[in-house]
Image (cartoon, rainbow, N blue to C red):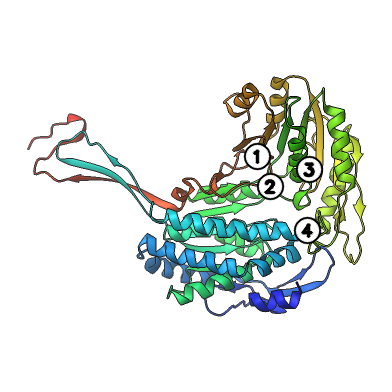
């Protein structure tokens, strides 16, 4: 698929302003983002960043739209989100190709990311008819208690480069059916995907007569846009995906004004491979978990904890798979691993490999920067396997690259200690045919992560479950289950339908 077709069908141009709240795009700053393909260095486009004045314009529009949008019945809001899902289906091929072109993940993963957006729209449509609260039993005669949920306000969404469309979709689909307006600050590394998504939504919202400001995008520097967004008292909820360092900053600023956050931060995900398991399944999951998206998923498998009795045999098979990885153009269907996002990510990769060796690690495969055909940028690296102790400082941190740290264990208790002995707690998995081992892993004595899988890898999650992690991963939850509650305002109601006045707890107050 050509760049010209992708741009034409998604309404992209060579140079574009970076702010929109429906209608025309605008930007009044002189700062320009130059967007290049991470695979080839080809110039994809230029985006003028939003200014402080542009941000204020967007927020005013969003606040005004909220007053109108929240009045729509939730099933009607769900119907509009259904139409967004239809529009995404129609644009799936070109939007998925744009994700691959701009971010660098291989095409099947780019298409899969758009499918995630479609799936969450479908989920949200059904959820729109079940934004319900319970009826509770009152202790007072002639009284009724119940809970209900109201639209919250303008939701601020900050996303990272690695999922440049799906994470926005997880948040917006639910926020919209809940009656909230949204303001999106995407990563400056992938602004074209944000512009394309906003263009798709603008058409649907305009067709349904929604006010400008119901959905908005503000592309700009963190110091200019991000800091304003997280400090803005008009935004009751900020959902942010990124590094733990970034999350601590956002949590502190939003918390200081008693706002809410959904934080999806760093992962340091481990897969335990028992001697009693389907080794082929474990091998496939470890391989995709570590190599998929060039290791640039928050759920990528970072650590592989293998039982000592199968350790060498399992690693030999894994290394054989690594040796057959086709690295190159992410739009080429033969490619299995594309580039890292930029040369800064490559520098982080090199630093991590050097640190691992200095801290006692042994490189079993890879570890080098790789030059691919047509490449004008130094962004391709070899998928890498390093044997190292879990206590090594580099293993305790997250490097957004295809580096897999491997280690052995003797008992399940030892494996769990290794597994949990990191600051992060996002995704985890065990491969085992033992009911006892699986039950232990999922119990309070097992994984301390927000996601814990048995005979399923760490990487990738269905939208039906709540997504998020514990510890330095931030504690936030996005996507399915009852996550919709985070986007609404909860209210407890008591109704006295009798003529008698009854105080709670039997209090008497005669007059």
Q: Quadrant of the N terminus?
A: bottom right
The residues tagged by marks 3 and 1 sit, at their Cα atoms, a distance apart of 16 Å
Q: Are marks 1 and 2 in contact (CB under 8 Å)?
A: yes
| Residue assigned mark 4 | 341
Secondary element at image label 2: loop
Q: Answer with mark 4 or mark 1, whichever residue precedes in sequence.
A: 4
At 60% from the left and 63% from the top, the residue drawn is 185
Front position in the image: 473 or 75:
75
Please provide percent x and percent y for residue 389.
82, 29
Residue designated by label 3: 287
Distance CA(mark 2)–CA(mark 4): 14 Å
Q: Residues within 10 Å of mark 1 (few under 14, many from 20)?
A: many
Label 3 residue SS: helix
* Residue 357 against residue 218 in the figure, above or below: above
Task: Write down the residue under mark 1.
Answer: 427
Q: Nearer the viewer, mark 3 or mark 1?
A: 3
| Left/right of residue 488 with respect to residue 354 in the rendered view | left
Between the residue at mark 3 and the residue at mark 2, the CA separation in whole angstroms equals 16 Å
Q: Disc 3 versus disc 4: distance between alpha carbons?
A: 20 Å
Of callouts 1 and 2, which one flags the residue occurring earlier in the amino acid sequence? 2
> Which callout, 3 or 2, points at the residue further toward the start of the chain?
3
Picture residue at 82% right of the left edge, 33% below the top:
406
Q: Position of residue 465 (x, y in %)?
A: 54, 44
Residue 469, image quadrant: top right
Q: Judge whether residue 232 can be spotted in this image.
A: no
Q: Nearer the viewer, mark 3 or mark 4?
A: 3
Q: Nearer the viewer, residue 90 or 141?
A: 90
* 80 is higher (above) or lower (below) than 146: below
Q: Quadrant of residue 95?
A: bottom right
């Amino acid at each position: 698929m050509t760049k010209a077709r992708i741009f034409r069908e998604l309404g992209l141009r060579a140079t574009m302003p970076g702010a929109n709240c429906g209608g025309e795009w605008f930007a009044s700053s002189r700062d320009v983002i130059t967007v290049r393909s991470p695979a080839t260095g080809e110039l994809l486009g230029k985006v003028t960043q939003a200014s402080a004045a542009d941000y204020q314009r967007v927020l005013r529009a969003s606040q005004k739209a909220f007053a109108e949008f929240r009045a729509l019945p939730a099933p009607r809001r769900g119907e509009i989100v259904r139409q967004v899902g239809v529009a995404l289906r129609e644009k799936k091929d070109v939007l998925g190709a744009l994700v691959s072109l701009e971010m660098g993940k291989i095409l099947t993963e780019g298409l899969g990311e758009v499918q995630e957006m479609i799936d969450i729209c479908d989920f949200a449509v059904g959820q729109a008819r079940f934004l319900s609260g319970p009826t509770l039993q009152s202790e007072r005669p002639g009284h009724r208690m119940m809970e209900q949920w109201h639209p919250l306000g303008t939701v601020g969404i900050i996303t990272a480069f690695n999922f440049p469309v799906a994470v926005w979709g997880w948040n917006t689909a639910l926020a919209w059916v809940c009656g909230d307006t949204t303001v999106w600050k995407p990563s400056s590394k992938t602004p074209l995907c944000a512009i394309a998504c906003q263009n798709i939504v603008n058409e649907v919202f305009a067709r349904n007569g929604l006010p400008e400001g119901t959905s908005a995008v503000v592309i700009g520097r963190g110091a200019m846009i991000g800091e304003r967004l997280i400090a803005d008292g008009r935004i009751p909820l900020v959902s942010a995906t990124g590094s733990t360092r970034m999350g601590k900053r956002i949590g502190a600023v939003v918390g200081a004004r008693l706002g809410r956050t959904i934080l999806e931060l760093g992962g340091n995900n481990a897969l335990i491979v028992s001697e009693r398991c389907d080794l082929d399944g474990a091998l496939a999951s470890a391989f995709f978990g570590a190599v998929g998206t060039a290791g640039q998923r928050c759920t990528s498998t970072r650590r592989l904890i293998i039982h000592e009795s199968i350790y060498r045999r399992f690693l030999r098979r894994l290394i054989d798979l690594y040796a057959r990885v086709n690295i190159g153009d992410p739009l080429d269907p033969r490619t299995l691993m594309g580039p890292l996002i930029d040369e800064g990510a490559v520098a982080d990769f090199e630093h991590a490999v050097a640190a691992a060796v200095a801290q006692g690690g042994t490189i079993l495969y890879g570890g080098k920067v790789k030059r691919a055909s047509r490449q004008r940028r130094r962004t391709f690296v070899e998928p890498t396997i390093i044997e190292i102790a879990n206590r090594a400082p580099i293993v305790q941190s997250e490097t957004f690259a295809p580096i897999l740290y491997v280690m052995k264990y003797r008992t399940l208790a030892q494996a769990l200690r290794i597994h949990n002995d990191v600051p992060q707690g996002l995704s985890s998995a065990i491969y085992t045919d033992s009911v006892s081992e699986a039950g232990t892993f999922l119990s309070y004595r097992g994984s301390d992560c927000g996601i814990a899988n048995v005979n399923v890898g760490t990487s990738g999650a269905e939208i039906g479950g709540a997504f998020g992690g514990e510890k330095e991963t931030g504690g936030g939850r996005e996507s399915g289950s009852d996550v919709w509650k985070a986007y609404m305002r909860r209210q407890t109601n008591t109704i006295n339908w009798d003529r008698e006045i009854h105080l709670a707890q039997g209090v008497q107050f005669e007059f």
